[in-house]
Amino acid sequence: MSSGIKVTAPVTISNINCGFDVLGIALEHTCDEIIGREHKKPGIHLNLVGPNARATPADPAKNTATVAIMKMLEFLGDSGKVGLEINLRKTIYPGSGLGSSAASACAAVMIANELLGRPLEKKMLLPFAILGEYAADQAFHADNVAPCLLGGVIMVRDIRLLDVHRIFSPPGLYITVISPDVQILTSEARAVLRDTVPLKDTIKQTANIAAFVQAMHTGNFDLLSRSLQDHVIERQRSALIPGFDEVKEIARDQGVLGFGISGSGPTMFALSQNENVARDTGQAIAAYYDKKGIETRTIMSLVNHEGTVLC
Ligand code: HSE
């Protein structure tokens, strides 16, 4: 049996306050990895391993990795012809707000592409990863899969047109993520959202997303800080996260540039210009949750510019 090839896909945070379903960042922290090899029997042979394997659907019709590969094989006309063995190591718990389902889908399409002799360019794998993630949350959005696959800070204008762009990220931007031990499924966190947004909030949100892009391109951290506000989603979802308002105050007191919900939560993130601020914020919030008897995991990272990679 061949030793196989390995792909890793990073943790991502999406929305970034003002960019619901539009903005996402890849972190320098592995979310999922896949070791894959050809299999003599046609079909996708999935093995789930790692600390969070049991929390991940083993049914190929519900697993984002297998769905993404099936969609890709259909497109290539290879369904039922090739056999692929996919050993998926889940490091991050699904439902944590760190792009766990997206990472499985991205790692899957990348490894399948390699095993098939690389018929597609990396960006062309994106639609299949989006379809794979749909299996997890029944929603089409690319604000986790696009940064996860391509790396960097990504803006998604239109997923059908693959109108997805990398935004320049100034050096020295630190990301802290804090995950309380609570599970929120994206489908549930989307179900709480109202369908309509008042015009005044739309104006504020649009202004902030424009300011975000300008601030990133010019390295204007003061403008970046002012742009990191969410007038649409946060107040509808924050009740799902224990202590959210207090924790936001703690982060502000530490001097972060911005603080918010990572994707659909419960993970929260802070952006900082200073490594000490990033570290102290993680520690202060972990101490808050510790007093409440809630376990947390924290990650501190710079922006990952590679995305999903072959190792
Ligand atoms: N933009 C999506 C949401 C990301 O917030 O529902 C889910 O991880």
Image: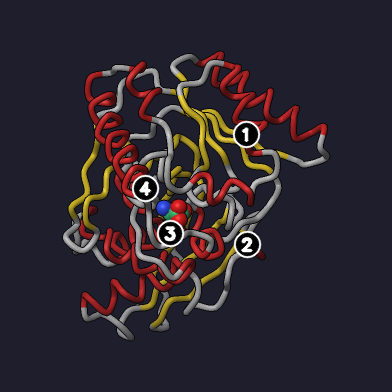
Residue closest to the eye, 274 or 249: 249
For the residues labelled 4 and 2, the Cα–Cα distance comes to 20 Å
Q: Amino acid at mark 3?
A: Gly
Q: Residue at x 40, y 66 (%)?
A: 139
* Of the image marks 3 and 4, the number of the one nearer the N terminus: 3
Q: Amino acid at mark 1?
A: Thr
Instruction: State yes or no: Cβ of the residue under disc 3 lies below 8 Å from any atom of ligand 1.
Output: no
Of circles 3 and 4, which is in front? Answer: 4
Of circles 2 and 1, which is in front? Answer: 1
Q: Amino acid at mark 2?
A: Ala
Residue assigned mark 1: 298
Q: Residue at x 21, y 63 (%)?
A: 160
Residue assigned mark 3: 4
Under circle 1, the secondary element is strand
For the residues labelled 3 and 2, the Cα–Cα distance comes to 20 Å
Q: Amino acid at mark 4?
A: Thr
For the residues labelled 1 and 4, the Cα–Cα distance comes to 22 Å
Q: Which mark is residue 53?
A: 2
Is 224 placed above or below 231 here?
A: above
Is 253 placed above or below 178 here?
A: above
Residue 218 appears in the picture as rendered = yes
Q: Position of residue 251 (x, y in %)?
A: 59, 24
Residue 85 appears in the picture as rendered = no
Q: Residue at x 27, y 79 (%)?
A: 74
